[in-house]
Image (cartoon, grey):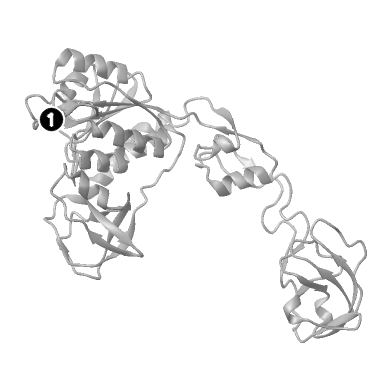
Amino acid sequence: MPIVVTVTWEEGRACIRDRMQTVIRSRPAETVSLLEADGRVLAEDVPADRDYPAAARSVRDGFAVRSTDLPGTLKIVGEVRAGTKFDAAIGPGESVEIMTGAPVPAGADQIVMVEHAQRVNGGFSTGRPANMGEFINPQASEARAGETILATGKRLGFADIAWLATVGRSEASVYPLPRVAILATGDEIVDLAEVPLDTQIRNSNAYSLAVQVRRAGGIPEILPVAPDEIDETRRLIQRGLQSDLLLLSGGVSAGKYDLVEQVLADLGAEFFFDRVRVQPGQPLVFGKAQGTFFFGLPGNPASTMVTFEVFAQLALCLLGGEPHPALPLSFARLTQDFAHKPGLTRFLPAVLNCGDITPVAWKGSSDVPSIVKANAFLVADAARETWAAGDMIGVLPK
């Protein structure tokens, strides 16, 4: 059996990053259509194909003028709409009526908004002062030709898809989705369709993990439940090690029938840590066997959910090609006093609403209903004991 290595949650995440650096982007990229690229990790840099904007353009409806003519009354000598061009140059005392997005005519260096102009016969008057460049986006002010806007390793969202379309890309080169095997362990676990005895529970962990894997950009495969029996547990673990990442649920505590670490050790596993100073989720194992990284997650549902979010999701994002995935921690204001025993960082169910956070009463790591009622986890610092209502405290979105 491995020597127990206990880490803080920050040390655990640092260990995962350190151990997995060599596998980041180790697999060949694949090409997908633009719509299929949503949520995938980019495997190439995508530069600007030209200046943006390609020519100086107006950001308001109004009149293109020479700033030296303001304030005053100017003659309107033409009109330019988005998608068209005014071929002549504006002379002294002249203006061109211009629409939002239209290119600024030569000679003009300011836009007077239509709201600031009073039309007179053949022209308009305005009291606006000279302000060179007002309401004009200069050429290349958004991006220069050849400038990298999307970089390798970016997980693509709607704005990134818009950029790909802007530069004329109908496809994108992305990293393949990691395949993640999910293996629940324990004689007490039964199938969803079964009516459990009082001593049994349905296999909820496998399904919550599968959803978490998909949300993190992986392809989940739920394996049959491993009983508390060495040979069958070994067979199923070996099957799971054929994937890019193996997530085991249960069997990593110190009980007589917690067999996972023993089986992994027999398979030549290297263990990097096997306990984390968090609640829920202290008995967490991270290691590598037969070339595949694995996590032994605690069996209680809340522990499984929390340890995936804080630790296993990081590994999955790294496997998917993200170079620097971050835990989305923020802060919110407590609506009530809160206290806990120092020593462990606690990730507890809570309701986050408009910057305020309220703890949800819970009965421990098996209390799934409390997690359902929550939309976030309150993060209580291991070194602090009490918080008063109105104090700021850490928050992890659910």
Q: Position of residue 246 (x, y in %)?
A: 31, 26
The residue at the point 11 percent across, 55 percent down is 341
Q: Relative to residue 256, is residue 208 drawn left or right?
A: right
Q: Which residue is mark 1?
A: 200
Vertical order, 90 against 49 (above or below)? below
Quadrant of res 110? bottom right
Q: Position of residue 346 (x, y in %)?
A: 20, 51
180, 209: nearer the viewer: 209
Q: Is label 1 in a helix, a strand or a loop?
A: loop
Q: Position of residue 275 (x, y in %)?
A: 18, 37
Task: Look at label 1 and name its amino acid.
Answer: Gln
Vertical order, 146 against 180 (above or below)? below
> Is residue 360 shown to the viewer in this render?
yes
Quadrant of res 190? top left
Vertical order, 62 against 288 (above or below)? below
Q: Position of residue 126 (x, y in %)?
A: 79, 84
Q: Relative to residue 266, is residue 216 drawn left or right?
A: right
> Is residue 17 shown to the viewer in this render?
no
Quadrant of res 142? bottom right
Q: Relative to residue 331, is residue 2 drawn left or right?
A: left
